Image (tube, rainbow, N blue to C red):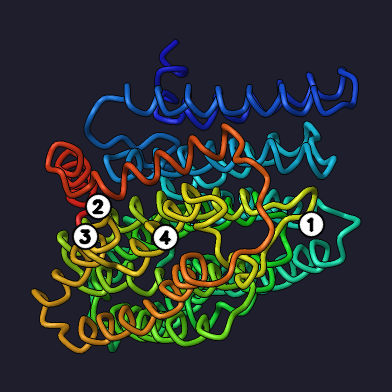
Amino acid sequence: MSILLSYAPAYPEMLLAVGAMALLMIGAFSEDSPQTGAFVGWLSIALMIMAAGLIVLQPEGTQYPFERAFVVDQFARFMKLLILGGSAVAMLLSFDFLRGKNLMKFEYPILLLLACVGMMMMVSANDLIALYLGLELQSLALYVLASMQRENVRSSEAGLKYFVLGALSSGMLLYGASLIYGFAGTTGFSGIANVAQAQPAAENIGLIVGLVFLLVGLAFKISAVPFHMWTPDVYQGAPTPVTALFAAAPKMAAMGLLMRVLAGAFPGLEQQWQQVIWFIAIASMLLGAFAAIGQTNIKRLMAYSSIGHVGFALVGLAAGTPAGAQGVLVYLLIYLVMTLGTFACILAMQRGDEMIEDIDQLSGLAQNNLVLAFILAMLMFSLAGIPPLAGFWAKVYVFWPAVQAGLYPLAVIGVIASVIGAYYYLRIVKIMFFDEPGEKFVPISPNLGLVMGAALVFIFAFAIPQLGGPIIEAAQAAANSLRL
């Protein structure tokens, strides 16, 4: 019994892993039909809700099971709830699309569950080996999901590109981890932190080189410039619900892991890693602002948008303060809601059996479907950071800590990039409301309508203290436990 209790901090991950195995048995011994796939899909959502319940019920404080290779604190709990929420909503968005494309297979929700286990391990990793295990468990499942539409050449190409570049990033990350282990003599974050703080940076060159390679691997996972090259092609080629998943949960996990590594293992090398974060934040913001201007495919546009938003989130991390970490967490939560709401709108863009991805085909949507046009317009305004919507407050929470830390150039570039990026969001609104209408889209399904409606309510209601206040307090508690 005492052994079982010692594993209690990892019960949510265990529940999902055991549940995935059970669902695999259900699928394997049931008839291969869309009904079986849908049944397993709903059970996977139920498992994620149960795992979230276990996380909420966990006692406060920090716990270190598995010989301190795993850590569960307020930060891990906050990030895991975001990951589970993003994964569950991505699964909910999948049903209609998969049914329409005859892809409603039981393997899809099982792979999503296993990816979710890997993501949750990533934000609780307190050791380089645990970090890599979580990262690869997530990645291997996502490689398959990206290429699951096998008869579609673009989907196969997306999966192959994601696999090849993901393998390259994993190799760089492993090389960095091996250097860090060689110079620190340990894989545990606390041991690495002791070595990093024990001597000046000039005597820690080996550790710094290892940290750079580690950051390169993690920058691939969050699709930060200059390691973003896979993002537009994979976003466009993967099935749209999988793209929605990529834009949501794995981003949360990779950002959480990046924050955990920098705060937990390298507090003594803050000046060194801040320079790297500075560079990739500026490059991501500017590329996200300029590269999306000429895009005609809305999924590619969302890919460049996600690159820009990663840059904005990194501004808060570059501040290197608890307020900056809190800003990143608030930003990630708001970005998650806005992205999932936008992809619900993209999945609703359908004429007959054809999914519409061309932005120009949204022309005059307000005259044919005012509800869809209004929700998508509000989400575009929020992504652009127009007050008083949630996207505006997200940027306030990352730019203000940067100003307080004296990072004025970073904050100014962020504001300029926001203004430039607003062009391509507002262009979509202009096309929907002022261009000549085309053919009508099919009616919005209940699943998509639910996600779109919830996202719309959230982006308006975040400014209300009764809703935004508890979220900001939870983010502050999470950031304080990270000890950035």
The residue pinned by badge 3 equals 393
Please tell me which residue lies in front, 352 or 308: 352
Query: Picture coordinates of residue 445 (x, y %)?
Result: 61, 36
Query: Picture coordinates of residue 474 (x, y %)?
Result: 21, 41
Comparing labels 4 and 3, the label whose residue is closer to the camera: 4
The residue pinned by badge 1 equals 147
Q: CA distance from mark 3 to mark 2?
A: 22 Å
Q: How would you rate the neighbour count of disc 4 (Cα within 10 Å): few for under 14, some for 14-19, many for 20 or more?
A: many
For the point 85% across and 40% down, the residue is: 102
Q: Earlier in the sequence, mark 4 or mark 1?
A: 1
The residue pinned by badge 2 equals 482
Q: CA distance from mark 4 to mark 1?
A: 31 Å
Q: Earlier in the sequence, mark 3 or mark 2?
A: 3
Q: How would you rate the neighbour count of disc 1 (Cα within 10 Å): few for under 14, some for 14-19, many for 20 or more?
A: many
In this image, 160 relative to 208: left or right?
right
The amino acid sitting under disc 4 is Ala
Comparing labels 1 and 2, the label whose residue is closer to the camera: 1
